[in-house]
């Protein structure tokens, strides 16, 4: 194998930087455009693929650069059609991404970090140490891989993307933003930002920064409780970023973007299945226009958390609706292959 360590990842270069590189070599700058197109639109895995460049040019590039492409190591298919990819990165670390098909959509659920630095007690990914942030191209490649699978298995392109895989996207904000830029760019995948949701545990400072940056994608917050004491118990991260700070950041977000927030919410037995929890959520939903997605709990085998009774969920739905707050109850997908929310934990590695 070629020693890759001292070569530069060519996909860290912008189109301008590529053009400049060719100019500096005394070559025509349009070569930069060609290479860029190979890398980002045609998904080339090697310089050999770039057939409109001369052989000399291709081996010249080979001596200077690497293409750190991801490889789908293992693909699992659920009985409900969900597909989970175990994705190997150039340094042999693994992340997972998921394709979720419905009648009308194909959604990609992508990872933003290897492991996660947060320690949400109900999430399997939290048991993995955060190893590193993903690079923009590593995020982009997950999307491309799922788009290809969607075309292959469902005869349609990918329609939506959610940043709900491994990691906390707002703790790798710059790279997530660069990946989304590429995903939405005309010379990338050309997807509408309105079809992209970034999900966060709620880092107030970064939510404000996103609002200031004028991002066009949607925001989801994994809320799970609108009572500090309860939320801190299940998401210890809440002690550093309490609900008052989150609330302030969300109000700021809405004022700047006018984009409604989605709260993700799991109802657990004995934790947030009481009336007080429901009332707190209703109150929290009134600070800024929001809708609630109640997610089914996916057991992670710790015996501590369990899905609340259907009556508890009904109580949430009825109360929220009475207050004119949109609420949906989402069934889990891909449970049989550990591809559902909170189950991504590189199990096949063990
Ligand atoms: N760190 C980001 C992205 C992860 S998204 C965030 O927290 O939003 C994964 C979503 O699945 C989050 O809403 C998370 O709270 C939820 N989740 C985690 N573990 C789960 C489980 N065992 N069952 C159901 N949902 C879970």
Image (cartoon, rainbow, N blue to C red):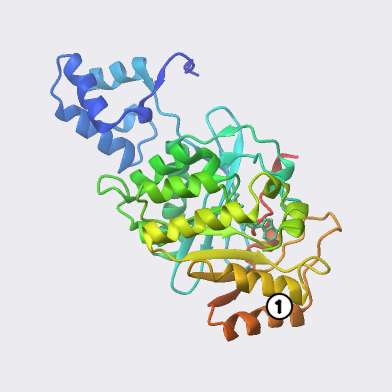
Is 130 displayed left or right of 68 in the figure? right
Residue toward you, 42 or 299: 299
Q: Is residue 9 above or below residue 325?
A: above
Please identify the residue farthest to the right as the structure is shown: 303
Q: Which residue is mark 1?
A: 313
Residue toward you, 303 or 225: 225
Q: Residue at x 47, y 74 (%)?
A: 103
Residue toward you, 35 or 232: 232
Q: Is residue 123 above or below residue 321?
A: above
Q: Position of residue 71 (x, y in %)?
A: 51, 38
Q: Position of residue 119 (x, y in %)?
A: 72, 45
Q: Position of residue 216 (x, y in %)?
A: 36, 55
Q: Count numbered badges in the picture.
A: 1
Whether residue 93 is visible, yes or no, is: yes
Whether residue 347 is visible, yes or no, is: no
Q: Is residue 299 above or below residue 132?
A: below
Would you identify the image quadrant in which residue 280 lies? bottom right
Q: Residue at x 51, y 69 (%)?
A: 290
Q: Is residue 243 above or below residue 173?
A: below
Is 311 displayed left or right of 35 in the figure? right
The quarter of the image that holds ligand 1 is: bottom right
Label 1: state its secondary structure.
helix
User: In which quadrant will I find the C terminus?
Assistant: top right
Q: Residue at x 56, y 47 (%)?
A: 203
Is 23 displayed left or right of 184 in the figure? left
């Amino acid at each position: 194998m070629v020693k890759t360590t001292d070569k530069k990842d060519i996909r860290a270069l912008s189109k301008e930087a590529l053009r400049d590189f060719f100019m500096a070599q005394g070559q025509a700058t349009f070569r930069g455009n060609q290479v860029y197109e190979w890398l980002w639109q045609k998904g080339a895995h090697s310089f050999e693929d770039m057939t409109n460049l001369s052989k000399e040019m291709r081996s010249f590039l080979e001596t200077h650069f690497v293409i750190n492409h991801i490889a789908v190591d293992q693909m699992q298919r659920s009985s409900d059609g969900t597909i989970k990819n175990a994705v190997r990165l150039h340094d042999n670390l693994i992340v997972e991404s998921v394709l979720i098909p419905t009648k009308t959509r194909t959604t990609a659920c992508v990872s933003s970090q290897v492991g996660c630095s947060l320690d949400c007690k109900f999430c399997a990914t939290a048991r993995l140490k955060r190893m590193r942030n993903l690079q923009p191209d590593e995020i982009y490649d997950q999307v491309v891989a799922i788009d290809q699978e969607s075309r292959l298995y469902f005869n349609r392109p990918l329609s939506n993307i959610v940043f709900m895989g491994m990691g906390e996207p707002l703790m790798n904000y710059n790279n997530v933003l660069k990946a989304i830029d590429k995903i939405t760019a005309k010379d990338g995948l050309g997807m509408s930002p309105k079809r992209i949701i970034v999900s966060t545990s709620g880092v107030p400072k970064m939510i404000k920064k996103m609002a200031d940056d004028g991002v066009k994608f949607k925001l989801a917050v994994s809320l799970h409780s609108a009572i500090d004491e309860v939320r801190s118990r299940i998401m210890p991260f809440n002690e550093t970023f309490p609900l008052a700070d989150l609330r302030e950041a969300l109000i700021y977000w809405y004022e700047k973007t006018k984009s409604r927030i989605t709260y993700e919410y799991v109802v657990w037995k004995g934790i947030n299945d009481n009336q007080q929890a429901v009332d707190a959520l209703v109150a929290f939903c009134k600070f800024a226009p929001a809708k609630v997605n109640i997610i089914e709990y996916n057991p992670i085998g710790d015996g501590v958390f369990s899905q609340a009774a259907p009556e508890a969920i009904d109580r949430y739905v009825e109360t929220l609706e009475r207050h004119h707050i949109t609420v949906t109850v989402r069934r889990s997908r891909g449970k049989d292959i550990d591809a559902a929310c909170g189950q991504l934990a590189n199990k096949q590695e063990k």
